[in-house]
Image (cartoon, helix red, strand yellow):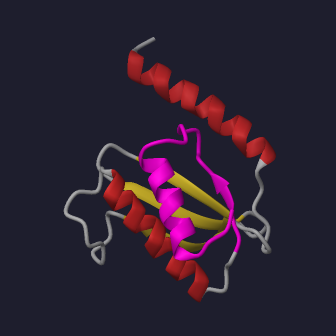
Amino acid sequence: MKTIQLKQTRRGRRRRGIRRTIFGVPARPRLTVFRSAKHMYAQIIDDLTGQTLVSASTNEKASKTDRGGNCGAATQVGEALATRARQAGIEAVVFDRNGFRYHGRVKALADGARKGGLSF
């Protein structure tokens, strides 16, 4: 099996294991993170209705970063997501790292969301 396919398969297994235990309800929706090579994406999802309540990414036009693949950009995405969530009336979330290790850009996004006022 090629290296990239192996990485994707392993991440998929970790993701399924995490999703068995994490479920977003209206009182505490799920904050999920996706990390690509160039950008960071984050959504707050209500799993009962299957709807995305709030989202933010480095790929948006309103994003203030010129590069989206670094920790500074991830922190800004977390802060933007937190402000949008607070405007929507969301105070607490459940963090879903989506199979990625909790370090680097994923941790920076989580710290930015906490700095913006979300609790998890």
Q: Where's the N terminus, which quadrant?
A: top left
**Residue range of the region highlighted in magenta in the rendering:** 92-120
Q: How many marks?
A: 0
Q: Position of residue 58 (x, y in %)?
A: 34, 63
- Residue drawn at point x = 44 percent, y = 58 percent: 41
Q: Position of residue 19 (x, y in %)?
A: 72, 45
Is residue 114 one of those drawn in magenta?
yes
- Residue drawn at point x = 22 percent, y = 57 percent: 67
Q: Position of residue 49 (x, y in %)?
A: 75, 70
Is residue 26 one of those drawn in magenta?
no
Q: Which corner quadrant of the image does residue 57 belong to?
A: bottom left
Q: Where's the C terminus, which quadrant?
A: bottom right
Q: Which corner quadrant of the image does residue 92 belong to?
A: bottom right
Residue, far top: 1
Looking at the image, residue 7 lies above or below residue 16: above
Q: Which corner quadrant of the image does residue 102 belong to?
A: top right
110 or 30, which is in the foreground?
A: 110
Looking at the image, residue 46 lies above or below residue 17: below
- Residue drawn at point x = 49 percent, y = 41 percent: 103
Residue, far left: 66
Looking at the image, residue 59 lies above or below residue 104: below
Q: Position of residue 6 (x, y in %)?
A: 48, 19
Q: Is residue 38 left or right of residue 6?
A: left
